[in-house]
Structures are given as structure tokens and as C-alpha cells.
Image (cartoon, rainbow, N blue to C red):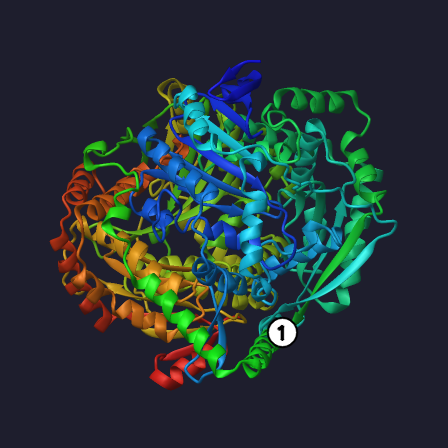
Amino acid sequence: MNITHGFELLREQQIPELNTLARLYRHVATGTELLSLINDDENKVFGITFRTPPPDSTGVAHILEHSVLCGSEKYPLKKPFVELLKGSLKTFLNAITFSDKTVYPVASTNTKDFYNLIDVYLDAVFHPRITPEVLQQEGWRYELNEDGSLGYRGVVFNEMKGANASPDRVLYVAVQRSLFPGHVYSVDSGGDPAVIPNLTYEQFRAFHERYYHPSNALIFFYGDDDPEERLRLLERVLAPFERISVDATIPLQPPFREPQRLEVPYPAGPNSADKHMVTVNWLLPDPPDVEEALALDILEHALVGTPASPLRKALIDSGLGENLTGSGFARLRQTFFTVGLKGVKGEHVHAVENMIIDTLGRLVHDGIDPQTIEAAVNTVEFQLRENNTGSYPRGLVVLFRALDTWLYGEDPLAPLMFEAPLRAVKQRLHNGGRFFERLIEERLLRNPHRTTVVLVPDLELTNRQNAAERERLAAIRATLDDAQIEQIATTAARLKQIQETPDPPEALALLPSLTIADLDRKIKTTPTEEMHIGATRVLLHDLFTNGIVYIDVGMNLHTLPQELLPYVTIFGRALLETGTQHDDIIQLTQRIGRDTGGIFPQTFTSAMRGQSDGAAWLFLRGKAIVEKSDALLDILHDVVHSARLDNRDRIRQIVREERASREASLIPAGHTAVNTRLRARFNEADWAAEQIGGVSYLLFLRRVERAIDEEWDTVYTVLERMRSLLVNRSALLVNVTVDAAGWDRFRPRLEAFLDRLPAGESVLAAWNPQPGALSEGLIIPANVNYVAKGASLYRLGYRLHGSALVVTRYLMTTWLWEQIREQGGAYGGFCSFDPRSGMFSYTSYRDPNLLRTIEVYDRSAAFLRQLELSEKELTRAIIGVIAELDAYQLPDARGFTAMARHIVGDDDAYRQQVRDEVLGTTPADFRAFADVLDMLHENAALVVMGNEDAITAANQERALFAAITRVL
């Protein structure tokens, strides 16, 4: 037996796909499994996962995920998680509850910081300080309202109230419940607000004791740190434990004999009075092996992954609904497939169900277009080889892939090694035999374990839920005697006292942290060369990209008159989703999938340093291996030159999809909506962003949807006018990220591409933004609010100093966290400062309060003025800002960020000055910023989105809003 630091090596294997050496261990004493991945990635990742099958919908797993990070045996603080947020160089720090597991991942590029994070997390999960008060704060509690009635408070309680106001989440929960009746997956692991108050402290503690043990843990390391140090660290932590038996097995769901149906109401507003959501869902009987799992990924992309995918296209073209529901294969203990439409009239529900089944049957009978399959295979293969995980560390995505099998006792390395299954899938296709058609027939159409889920709009559901909660609380209140009422008040007062009492300095000193000496004093730079190719400005970033070229073709939106800005998102999608002169939408999409890594539109808006005008651009962002870059440029030429903007049916579909998508995002991303709306009052760039993607855009979409039917010629003329103004090589900006050798091969192709584009005089239009009312209420069907307040500090006379970034972040992670989240019960309280525009704003997320939240914002200056800031606290605050300034990025993101800085004037000298000011921040800077916030609160705008009763009551009490608008 090969034992190292208490761990037995079970397996060692090279994974060429990740350029990684994998070692799988088992801790001899406890049975803990460890997957140690060794490679040269500096963005190191650690994760510890517990199997946590919830017994009911009290949200116990979710509440515990919050609670273990509220102090531990080694770190007896109220919120070590927040202290880590304040003062770490982390590139990822969070905890996530799933349907059957809870995952605690961290990541950092700094080794010392990485091991500090791991140390705090391991003590948190194994030795948490889960007192009754922690459950009261993070889960639920009774409190007495001002009128003497009972109310519920709690972070998770209000988080889930907000979550369940989203129809998409209601659908997600209903689909799982329909496929897994009576199973662990049929309960809501996040928690149902109607059930959360049933959770007792005894059940809460017992859940931790049962599942949070090393014998039930899966531990993961990834990156370039010392692999033996990983074992030494873990042995110290695991040594006190002995192996126990933990029953966390997830059984297979017994198969249905015949399809079933489920109808569920969802909270709807007047705009959704007859908008149903319909999905058809299949549960696969056996977990797929790695080859079939990869084949299902490819099949998903082929069926619903693009606007031209046959199942998606049939549903959208039918006109029976507005947009797809979340569709595709999902993996739990068993895999299931779901597909459907939202925005369906009640009379068309059965037609949608029939169309899904009939379309799949036709694809089996007639076959899937081979070019669609070829494009899907190439797209999935490109994604696997590129391994582009966006803003997430690569190791985090690898962890989640491994857990697809590892959690259920299977090989964690199998999902990471894609070469063999990819070859097998390609060989099956080469051999013929209708491989994907057979998968549809056998796994779906012949599978009786099928459900149809219908979400029915209910305009009174929110009111009924509120009334039921009030009745339940009133019934409980009626059973309480004076002593019990007094106990509730005493308990609430004790919790508030705990929340308001600072952690003692000696406890804070225990938390491991970096020092200023551990930080780089110099900014991180990206190589950027500016040149002109003909009349076109080109930026080149010489970075290693593993043979891929990334290109961003930018069109200056300032060439458009301002009344055309709301069309920008539609225009960007239309370029890629209407077909071209020579290719219909199916053929164009097949070309993109076959020859590139993808092309997508993206807008960029920002204030410009030292200027009143803002930057506003529409980019077409594409990528391909250098050898196929000529095909990428050919496609880009075809779409900008001859996209079928006269395709009325497809433009109508795009507008419907956009409207449905924006409506669906309002509740899950309400804090973003109100912040965008607020900022639009103060500068041109944020005003443009709101026109292009905010509430104004949603209201525009509703108007233009009618115009497409009634005034199509006008809409078409606008789109063609936009093309003539935007597609002008004299006004373009092209951004390229590739290494020097790749650039040598790519440049001649880029020159030829640009030569074929029209050229003309570039004239910038003058915009005259018309901001809305300074105070506004937006009504949605939800039980929570999103409250934003802010103003431009530059208009108030403030001059930028880098310390503002430190103060802003500290204010968010202390005062607002404590007042808005811990005491107020909201899921989040934030503040942000934009150094380019001077815009400072407060926002809250899934907030049960409204007036109280505004009062907290207004007391922020007093908090800063009275603050007694220790040197260690100041250091943590500075470190947290440096982590944001040095955020880890993959090559394509580095190139795009460097371009953005170039556009707005953030040169290296300016960035270094800000960094120096951040590093030199003093307590006096906090007090000085308090004076600025005092001015803000007297001159701020206010935007609140939330429940009609809450907005109306607040307006009656304080006359807050100059305008109130129903948006859902």
C-alpha cells in the first residue's frame, strides 16, 4: 500500500486533454477521497464537496451552506467569509447548494492566499459555529412588527421568496418534481418559503452532523501548487476524525409506465395574463457512459443550441410561443431532457406538446441534416479543446465535470478525458447507421418516463401567498401568551446585539491574511499595438492563444442618431440570425458551427475618462483556429454585407425572444435593472446602455413588436439605415488577440477582409439624452424589492482618488452587508463606484424592505465618519481592491479588456496612479469620503423595483416617487 501523509494512492494518470497529471487518493483513516490535479495553471482551485440529499423543502442544505461560513472553532468570528471577501486575492470564493450536493470552492493565483482560503474553509465545514442565532439570521426567525403582529425574517427565507417570483425557477423545480415524484429530487433544496419555517434547530444541527464528515467528503485540488503540501495540509485537518458510515446514496427513480402531466401556477402580472409555459421532459433510465454523455451534449447542440437547430426552429417558427424555455440535457443521478416554449396561449398548450413529439419523430424518420451534425460536433470539440471558461477558473469547471460521476461513486477522471469518446462518436458517424436519430428514438420517443409540465399564469398568486403567510402568522400569534411574545422580542434583541457587536481584535487577528508586502506594486499590462490597415484602426495583442485567433469587429454606435439606439441589440442579432444573400439561416449557422469557434454580438458602453461623451460600440466577436481564419472572415463579410434584414418573420422572432428574455430576467437580475436605470440619469454612456439593454429597451420591444406587424417598412428601413451607417471601414475598430506567428498568417487575410468593406466619411451624431424622473417606482409581481440610490460624485465636485475604490468596497462588505443582509434579511446589499463616470450607487437584492434600506444608505456617511479602522482592517480592504484590479483573465478576455481601456483612455500611467493611491489609502480617506456621501444623499436619484403594495405604501408615507410604472 502506497501511503503518503495518511493518503493511499489509488490511481495515477496523465490527462493530455488538460495537460495534467491526475492522482486519486483515499484517506486511510476516514475514507475521504481526494482528486489531486497537477499542472502549470497559476489559477489554483480547491473544492470540498459533501453529498447532501435534502429530506424536505425546508432548505436545510441551503441554510447550512450559508451558516457554516459564519464562524468556526479556529476562527470564532461572525463572518469569516466576508473577511475573506474583503481581504483576499481570491479569483473565486463561494459556496453552492445543488439538488444533492453542497460545494465549497475557492481559487487564487497567490499560493499563500490560496492556502489561507483553504484553511478557513476546511475549519468552517468541519467545525462550524452553528448556534441558534446563526440559524435565525441565515435561515428564519420570528420578529414582531411595529403593529405587534408576527413576521418572518431571514436571509435564505427572503432569498427564496425572490427566487420563487421567477417563473423560470418555478418551472425548473416543477420539472424535477414531475420526473422524480417522491424522490429526493422532488423537494426544493433551496427551500420553499412556505416550508422553511418548519425547520427546527435540532434538525439543522443533525443535518450537519450527518453529512459534514470527512467520510462523506470529496476533496479536489487543481493547479501549480506543491502536490505534497496538499496532502500534508489535509492530513492535519483530517487526523482527529475516524471513519463513519454515511448513507447519502441517491437511488434511481423507478420508471413510469406511461407519461404524466403536471400543472403549476406561477406569479404573473397583467402583461402575462395568458402566457403559459409548456415543457415536455424525459428521464433517461440509466446514467449514460462517457461516450453517450458526450453524444448527448452534441445532440443537444444539434437540436436546440442555435437559432437554426431543427427542434428549436420548429418551435419558434410555429408562432405558438415567444421563446424557448431552458432546454437541453441536465445531469443529476440520472440525466433528463427538457424542451418547451414560454409565452404560450392557453389554447395552444396541447399544440406545443404535440409539436415537440412530432418534430422529434420527423427527425428520426427523415434524419437530421448531416451538416447540422457536423457543425454540432465541431462546436462541441472546439469548446472542449479551447477550454474557455470565461470569468470562472478553469479548475472550477473541471471540478464540476468530475462531480458528474464522482458524486455517485463512479470514475471522476472519465468526464475529463474526451479524446477517446470523441473518436468513438466520430467513428459511429463515419460508419453510418443514424447514430443520433437512434438516440432520439431510444432515449426519448420510446421512453415512457415522460412528463408534460404546464405553468399557468396566476395574477393573484402573490397576493394569496402573502395572505396565507399572514394568516399562518396570525394563527401562531393567537396561541402565544405574554411570556412567549416577550421571548420573541428578547430573542430578536439578542440577535441584533450580536450582529451589531464587532468581532474582538484578538479574534480578527486569528484570521490568516496577506500583507501589503505580498502585493505587486506595479500594474499588470497586456501588450497592445495600435496600427492602421488602410482606413481602419486595428489593435493587436500578442498573447499565447494555443493556435486560436480572437477578433472583435467594432462598429461605432456614435454614428447612429440616438433614436436608433434601442434597435442595436436587434440589429446585432439580425446580422447573424437572418441568413445572407447566399445562405439561409440554416446554412449560415452550419458554416459558423463547422468553420469557427463561434460568432456573437456584444455591446460595450462606458464613460470616457475626462470627457462628457461616452464610448458606445457594437462588436461582432469571433474566434477560429488560425488555419480556418479565412473562413471566419468570409462569414463576417457575408453577414455585415448581406444579412437579410428584410427577413420579417425572423426579425419578429428575434424581437419576441428578446422581449421574453428581458421580462424573464427582471426578477432574477432586478438589482442590475434598477442600477442601470438609475445610472442612466447621470451620463451619456449609461443612458445609452439603458436604451440598448435596460427597462427602456423592454418597453421599446413591446412597441416595436407591434410595429413589425403594422409598419414593417419603417422597421426595415431603420435596420438598413443602421447597416449603412455602421458598416464603414473608416469608422471600424478591429481588435485581434493572437501570438506573433498567428498574426503573421492572419494579417493578410484581415487586410483582404477590410478591403472588401464599404468606405466613406465617418460622421458622429450628436446625442441629447433625456433622462427620466429622478425618483421612480417600477412594479413587478414579486414579494421582494430591489432598491437603488445614487448620483454622480463628479457633478458634486469630487475629484478622483484611488482610495474611493477601497472605501466603496469596505462599505459594501461591512456596513451594507450587516445592515441590509444580516439585519434586514435581504439576500444582498451593494455599492459601486465607476471611476470613469464618477457614478456612485447603492443597490439591494431580494430585499424585504424599502424605506429601511434607503435609511441605511443615508446613514453610510455617519458609519464612515465614526469608523475606527485598524491597520489590519485597512490592509484587508486594500488587498480586496487589488484583487479586483488584477482579476485573472484568459487571453480573449485580456485582449478585450485592453481594448476597452484603450477606447476610454485608461492608459498605463493613469492605472499606475490609481494603484498607488489604492495602496496608499489611509483612515483619513474614509472620513473624507463620508463628506462626499453626505452630498450624494441630498442630490441622489432613486429607482425601486418591487411589489405594488410596498411601493404604494412607501409613496404614501414619504412621497418618494415622481413616477410609478408597471413593467411586468
Q: Which residue is mark 1?
A: 461
Above or below: residue 231 compared with residue 179: above
Give the side of residue 641 with respect to residue 799, left or right: right
Give the side of residue 627 with respect to residue 499, left or right: right
Above or below: residue 143 compared with residue 69: below
Q: At 18% across and 53% down in the image, what residue appears? A: 869
Q: What x and y, as percent, mark residue 945? A: 44, 70
Using the image as rendered, state which of residue 179 and residue 325 is in the foreground. 179
Q: What x and y, as percent, mark residue 410? A: 66, 29
Q: The disc labelled 1 sits on which kind of residue? A: Leu
Give the side of residue 831 with respect to residue 220, left or right: left
- Say which quadrant the C terminus sits in: bottom right
Q: State which quadrant residue 229 falls in.
A: top left
Residue extending farthest top: 1
- Which class describes the residues within 10 Å of circle 1: few (<14), some (14-19), or many (20+)? some
Q: What x and y, as percent, mark residue 814? A: 30, 56
Using the image as rendered, state which of residue 914 and residue 341 is in the foreground. 914
Using the image as rendered, state which of residue 829 and residue 634 is in the foreground. 829
Query: What secondary structure is found at the residue carrying circle 1?
Result: helix
Give the side of residue 751 with respect to residue 784, left or right: left
Above or below: residue 490 compared with residue 670: below
Q: At 48% across and 82% down in the image, what residue appears? A: 149
Q: What x and y, as percent, mark residue 449? A: 81, 47
Q: Does any portion of residue 247 appear in the rendered image?
A: yes
Q: State which quadrant residue 496 falls in.
A: bottom left
Q: How many marks?
A: 1
Using the image as rendered, state which of residue 945 and residue 26 is in the foreground. 26
Residue extending farthest right: 257
Q: Does any portion of residue 754 appear in the rendered image?
A: no
- Say which quadrant the N terminus sits in: top right
